[in-house]
Amino acid sequence: MAEWGERLAGVRGVLLDISGVLYDGDAGGGTPISGSVEAVARLKRSHLKVRFCTNESQKSRGKLVGRLRQLGFDICEEEVTAPAPAACQILKEQGLRPHLLIHDEVRSEFDQIDTSNPNCVVIGDAGEAFSYQNMNKAFQVLMELEKPVLISLGRGRYYKETSGLMLDVGGYMKALEYACGIKAEVVGKPSPEFFKSALRAIGVEAPQAR
Amino acid sequence: MAEWGERLAGVRGVLLDISGVLYDGDAGGGTPISGSVEAVARLKRSHLKVRFCTNESQKSRGKLVGRLRQLGFDICEEEVTAPAPAACQILKEQGLRPHLLIHDEVRSEFDQIDTSNPNCVVIGDAGEAFSYQNMNKAFQVLMELEKPVLISLGRGRYYKETSGLMLDVGGYMKALEYACGIKAEVVGKPSPEFFKSALRAIGVEAPQAR
């Protein structure tokens, strides 16, 4: 314990990933990773501030938190930093109207966003919705723009489900980047801005966080 | 004409692209590009050797040539250099057994290839077959290999159909490269080896070709 005490000297806050750290997702709802429910509970009982920081873009925060609570985690929606709401803020700030290539389960995060006459594309981990037709539509929207803007909710290569490895959004982001000759703006980890916004939410500076 | 005479001085052979040069493809069978049927006929009547060099990987050479002949082109299967047969040669030489992520219409080119217990992936312009499920399967095959080998039939960004721009194989190649952390071997244009094989087929050296 002394060792942990030393390692935590000066630490005021902790950012926790969710997928692959707290639980492994699958079609049925996922399984907690051994010890993680109790670890979150202990952190919450400690003096440390806790923020959940995820690249999950297959579910809205509401659905994600609902699932985690069912699995026994002490977590609420307001404690989660996720790419979709971060992207919504950028869209509003920059007057962007997205064409959305995202998972149906995350669509509700964009309810307040104007998607008429799109002037950018937002791509998330769309799973089965990454059909050729949907990818081609996103590509065509980008190619018709004078200055194509592609916003990607994370840039993960793949993730693990209990059934095996699954392609994440990153590859599809690369496909559109290559086809259109552009560079995507990544919202989510590992973007420093994303981590900073998570820390701002708990009022902790980067050197005081783990 | 004198000008053309000068430009062709020393030229013994001509490599002709097909899609976007001889014709624009579409679901209905495509349309010849103005003047191209007569241009091929004139080249064939000239002293020049002619080879058709295409990255078409949505159709077998048989089907492609059949369609072009219907459109009025003087062309036969033996005059066409295409990525699928070139890939088959590499597969045989290197003892590779591919998992095929290709268009159904080009599958017959691989009839003589052993696809059991795959030790590589061949990706072509699969069109609608670029589903998430099919991409994920190709990804999983690669990730299970100790030394993943990805062969791509061309690396085109997009092509034009009469209905609009369409994503080509290149983006999907990039997606798998990124997700697996590997580099694909490209068979087809612009690989120098591909052009050389086309020239070998008509016995013409590179400086003598246009």
Image (spheres, coloured by chain):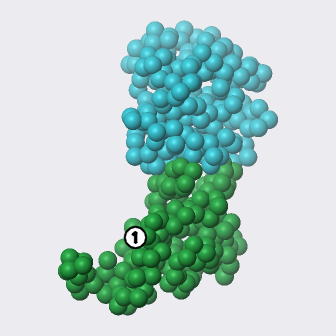
Chain colours: A green, B cyan
User: Mark 1, residues whose alpha carbon is within 10 Å: few (<14), some, or many (≥20)?
Assistant: few
Residue A126 in which image quadrant: bottom right
Placement of B68 over or under A183, stated as above or below: above
Give the residue displayed 74% in from the left and 24% down from the top: B67
Q: Is residue B168 left or right of residue A1?
A: right
Instruction: Mark yes or no: residue B210 visible.
Output: no
Residue A210: percent from the left, percent from the top?
Answer: 32, 77
> Observer-nearest residue: A62 or A187?
A62
Instruction: Mark yes or no: residue B179 visible.
Output: yes
Q: Is residue B83 left or right of residue B195?
A: right
Residue B158: percent from the left, percent from the top?
Answer: 58, 44
Placement of A101 over or under B89, stated as above or below: below
Residue B146 in which image quadrant: top left
Q: Where is mark 1, residue-wise?
A: A191
Residue B45 in which image quadrant: top right
Circle 1: residue type? Ser
Viewport quadrant of the N terminus of chain A = bottom left
Q: Which SS class for mark 1?
A: loop
Placement of A168 over or under B153, stated as above or below: below
> Observer-nearest residue: B165 or A56?
A56
User: Chain for mark 1?
Assistant: A
